[in-house]
Amino acid sequence: MKRLLILFIVTFLSLPIFAQNVEADGNNPASPMKNNIEIGAAILSTSINGQPVTMLGGYGGRKISENIFIGGGGFGLANNTAVTINNQNRFLKFAYGGVILGYSEAPFDIFQYRLYTLIGGGTIDYDKYTFNNLLFVSELGISGEIKVVEHFRTALAIGYRSVHGTEVEKISDANLSNFFWSIHFKVVGF
C-alpha cells in the first residue's frame, strides 16, 4: 500500500511537466489554453448489495494541458438502501471521494470523449456517516461529452468502481464494487 501511495504521489507531482508552454517555431509561443477550469455535478446509477441505488456527486479541476485533466470529486448515496440485520432494517450510508485524473481527445470540438480514473477513499456504515470504516476506492470510466453552449457541457459515462477494506456486517467489497453509468452536467472555461 505504501508503494502504491508513493507511486501515486510521484506521478501526481510530475504531471505539471506536461503543462509547459511550447514555442511553435522558436519565436511565437504556442496559443494559450482555453477552457482550463471545470466544475460539475453528476448523477450516478449502480447497484450495492444487489439493490439499485442512485448516488449524487460533484467534482472540479483544471486541464493542465490540452488533453490532461486533474481535479477532485466525491459521491454519496442519495436514496435509502435497507439491509436487514437481526430482523431490523438498517440504512446503509456510503460516500467516497478522491483525486480525478483524465485524458480527453478532441477537447475543443462539439463532441469529445474522456478516459478518467478516481483514486481515493471513502466510508461506509449504517444509519449515519462515521469515519470508523474507511475504504480504498478507485474508479475507471469513459465518457462521451457534448458541448451544449459555449461554457456548458453534458456527458454520459460508464465505468467500474472497485472498493477494498470493507469491514461492515452483511456488506463485502464485492457488494460495493460494481459497474455504473452516470450523467454529468458541467461548467467549463472560466
Image (cartoon, helix red, strand yellow):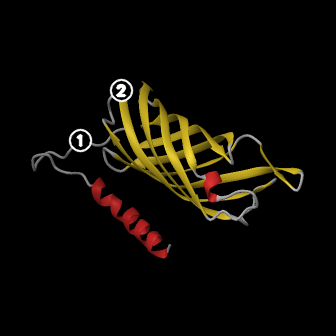
Return the x and y of residue 174 as percentages of the image width and height.
61, 55
Q: Residue at x 49, y 43 (%)?
A: 159
Q: Vertically, is 138 above or below 39?
A: below
Return the x and y of residue 170 as percentages of the image width and height.
75, 57
- Dividing the picture into quarters, in which one does residue 9 lie? bottom left
Q: Is residue 35 left or right of residue 137?
A: left
Return the x and y of residue 10 as percentages of the image width and height.
38, 69
Question: Mark 2 falls on what kind of element?
Answer: loop
Q: Which residue is mark 1?
A: 31
- How many neighbours does mark 1 have within 10 angstroms: few (below 14), some (14-19), or many (20 or more)? few
Q: Give how far apart the Cα atoms at labels 1 and 2 are.
A: 20 Å
Return the x and y of residue 113 as percentages of the image width and height.
37, 36
Q: Which residue is mark 2?
A: 110
Q: Vertically, is 115 above or below 162?
A: above
Q: Is residue 124 left or right of residue 37?
A: right
Q: Residue at x 40, y 62 (%)?
A: 12
For residue 176, say whether it is visible: yes
For residue 36, say whether it is visible: no
Query: Are the two marked residues, 1 and 2, in contact with CB atoms closer than 8 angstroms?
Result: no
What's the amino acid at mark 2?
Answer: Ile
Which residue sits furthest right?
87
Q: Residue at x 35, y 51 (%)?
A: 64
Question: Mark 1 falls on what kind of element?
Answer: loop
